[in-house]
Amino acid sequence: MKKKEKILIVEDEFIVANDLRLILQKAGYETSGIASSVEQAHKLIDQKKPDWVLLDIILKGQLTGIDLARDLKQKNIPFLYISANTNQSILEKAKETEPYGFLVKPFRERDLLVMLEIARYRYIIEIEQTASSLSENLAIEGIVGTSPSFTNTLEKVRIVAPTDTSVLILGESGTGKERIAQAIHQRSSRSLKPMITINCGALPISLIESELFGHEKGSFTGAVNRRIGKFELAHQSTLFLDEIGELQPECQVKLLRVLQEKEIERIGGDATIKVDVRIIAATNRNLEKEVAEGRFRLDLYYRLNVFPITLPPLRERKEDIEALAIYFLEKFSAKTGKRVDTISPQAMNQLKSYSWPGNIRELEHLMERSVLLATGSRIEEIPLPSVSFLPSQEQPTQIKTMEEMERDHILNALKICGGKVFGPGGAAEILNLPPATLYSKMKKLGIKQGYK
């Protein structure tokens, strides 16, 4: 971020806010003030016209940082979150506002400055690429969909593809993360060479280092030949790190070094090898939550999360189901040589009313099965899987996390106590917690502190 750009701090903890102000001023930034509530923030925004906003999620008053973020987005003011909140449902709502960064408390001075630099870099890319991108055709080979949420995804693909920027693709299993990675690679200057892929969750920890960096003959038991690692194979091309959230901490350290230094050493080798590799990573995990709980390195998260692209689940883009079903119908009809060319209205309604826990991958497999089972030129019925064994028709992913259960428990206690937190008959008393501990938990879990 260039010097003297104005940054507004929206944070209700004075000590944290003042630390942020001192760090920014020391680094040469201009602060537009400190706001502890959304209402104060709006006044300072109107008065000071900040270039960027740093905001916490939980603030004083009834409105949250997420509410403010929605307003900032409408005003085209870029923003970044700084929060200690690890509640998954709240983090998902925060991510929906598409911030330019997410810093987890507590943080180091260097973490903040690196995040700001990365955020500005991403913002510049979007500004520079948007004008030319808007005039291009939306179609990308092998990718189907015109729903608003998916069109927004494709717009981001077009913006980032021509650059060398690292991309982090987020989404549930089966949403097409590898297909999007291929689309980014194919629309880049590196497309003359193949994209190299490694599934970080499919390899045992003993093999990850060898797979990524290679090894010399005799470097360990079983190393009977020299092996060229994925980074070397991806030189001047793209390396797709699938399921990056599954990477073990010790491997995260080594990956971070390569991303920083742009050089590798084969296991058992003494030569340093320079590599020119563009990184695209993907995960179905919430990496902010993984960072907050100590399972994923914050510095590696920064290196990967330069330009995030979130793929919507199929249940949130049901208007695309018909086009996708027809696409797969044509694909598998040609592949099998069967003349199946239409889907009955009843079968299409089945597809549209299903919840699709497996997303596009599940739809693809189901259409392949339907083509194989079809006895005529039209698919009359779809062999949807039975979910009757699940209680109340709920999917396993709907099981609440421990944090969500704790949040519900505290909210229930507050309801019983009429919103009273401490004192006789207060929630702290019936939960057998010190009031200070309860207040801390309420803030962390995103429970409003508007109680006396």
Image (tube, rainbow, N blue to C red):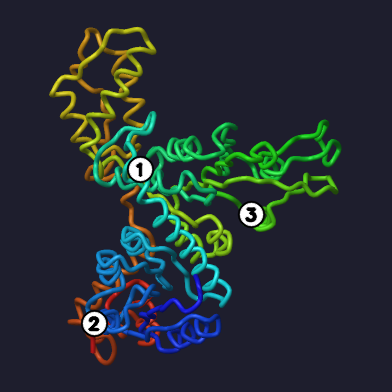
Three-letter code, disc 3 = Leu
Residue for badge 3: 259
> Where does the image place residue 59, in percent across and percent down from the top left?
31, 79
Identified at 22% across, 35% down, the residue is 354
Residues at marks 1 and 2, CA–CA distance in whole angstroms: 35 Å
Residue 50 visible? The answer is yes
Q: Position of residue 61 (x, y in %)?
A: 24, 82
> x, y (%) of residue 314?
29, 40
Q: Tell me the crowding category of disc 3: few under 14, some 14 to 19, or many 20 or more residues within 10 angstroms, Cα based.
A: some
Q: Are marks 1 and 2 in contact (CB under 8 Å)?
A: no
Question: Callout 1: 10 Å neighbours few (<14), some, many (20+)?
Answer: many
The residue lying furthest to the bottom in this view is 423
Badge 2 amino acid: Glu
**How far apart are labels 1 and 3 at the CA level?**
26 Å
Decide which of 233, 298 is in the foreground and name it: 233
As displayed, is residue 425 above or below residue 312? below
Mark in the foreground, 1 or 2: 1
| Secondary structure type for disc 2 | helix
* Amino acid type of the residue tagged 1 in the rendering: Leu
Mark number for residue 39? 2
Mark found first going from the N terminus, 1 or 3: 1
Residue at the image position 24 percent from the left and 83 percent from the top: 450
15 or 148: which is nearer to us? 148
Q: The residue tagged with tag 3: helix, strand or loop? A: helix
| 216 to 14, vertically: above or below | above
* Mark closest to the chain's N terminus, 3 or 2: 2
Q: Quadrant of residue 30?
A: bottom left
